[in-house]
Image (cartoon, rainbow, N blue to C red):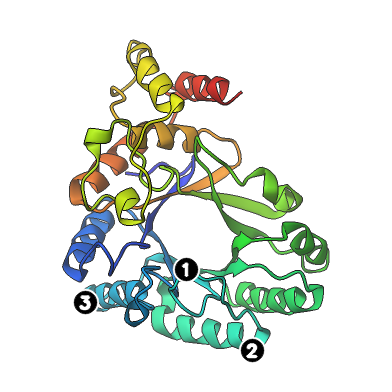
Amino acid sequence: MFNSIGPSIILGTAMWGWTLSKAECFQLMDEFYRMGGRQVDAATNYPINKIPTDFRAAEQILLEWIGTHGITDLEVIMKVGSINNLRTPDHNLSKSFLLLNLDDYRHRFGSNLDTFMIHWDNRDDRTEIERSLEVLEIAVQDGLQAGLSGIRHPDIYAGLNEAFQLDFRIQVKHNLFQSDLDRYAPLQDHARFLAYGINAGGVKLRTDHYRPESNLIVRGGSAGTTPLHTKLESLIPHWNQRDVPESIRNFNQISMIYAYHHPKINGILIGPSRIDQLQSSLHFFGLLAGDAYRPVYQSLLDIQN
């Protein structure tokens, strides 16, 4: 059901084992796979819920689902480096540790592993970063894609990559409130950007749309409104007067339009917590091919400017 021209859709697992039980995660994966989804984003430290016993719980749920169904054709992004799920910057990106992780995840996921991604790198030591890039080079030689996420010094990576000439899948926070795309400009000639946080952590258009288990509430965010909320609500009726395949009803749809039509975005991460949210997101994603919603995207750019 997904077109091959625009950005890809990627199922996120950040809340698995936290707000979502294993049974609920299995149901989401069943439906995502049935509807044609294959790309799944995971990380060693998911869920980041400050409960040490839940460290690596999300990846374990995904592995159990794969094993239960005998799946061999997923495209899993695995982010590595964090050594706990306590929301701290503690990490280990040494060459030896990354090689151990690479071997471990190749064994665990087999043909389902697609991208090996460095996660949360605050270092500025060029020698250490160069050794990490050597591991990504090995991963690419083994048929995987190289990835980066949460990199504090993209300029150092870009300089060192002149020797490696690696092409990266780079996860960037990108939404109507903030975007890290410009920060990664030094790497843009060797990057395909994957947008995460497109809903700004679970923002809704109206406060009565939040539930106690909503991601924004669980993570301690504020459920208030902003001038941007007011502006968007005022524009929705005008947007829906256009010849669009389906009326715009919520912030998630607006966020998907904003990410999908950005010329630098190659993939979009979604993090549904219910089957109906997943189905709605995948259905609307399928409508974004073509130019029907491009005027809405242009309108969003005008707001930003």
Among the two numbered marks 3 and 1 on one chain, the one whose residue lies closer to the N terminus: 3
Three-letter amino acid code of the residue under disc 2:
Ser
Three-letter amino acid code of the residue under disc 3:
Thr
Which residue occupies the foreground of this view, 217 or 103? 217
Three-letter amino acid code of the residue under disc 1:
Arg
Question: What residue sits 72% from the left and 53% below the top?
Answer: 187
Q: Position of residue 124 (x, y in %)?
A: 76, 69
Label 2 environment density (alpha carbons within 10 Å; few <14, some 14–19, many ≥20): few
Among the two numbered marks 2 and 1 on one chain, the one whose residue lies closer to the N terminus: 1
Residue under circle 1? 87
Q: Nearer the viewer, mark 3 or mark 2?
A: 2
Image quadrant assignment for residue 277? top left
Q: Is disc 2 placed on a helix, strand or loop? A: helix
Q: Position of residue 140 (x, y in %)?
A: 63, 72
Instruction: Determine the CA span between mark 3 and mark 1.
Output: 31 Å
Instruction: Determine the CA span between mark 3 and mark 2.
Output: 32 Å
Looking at the image, is 217 positioned above or below residue 54? above
Question: In this image, 141 relative to 58: left or right?
Answer: right
Label 3 environment density (alpha carbons within 10 Å; few <14, some 14–19, many ≥20): few
Q: Which mark is residue 109?
A: none
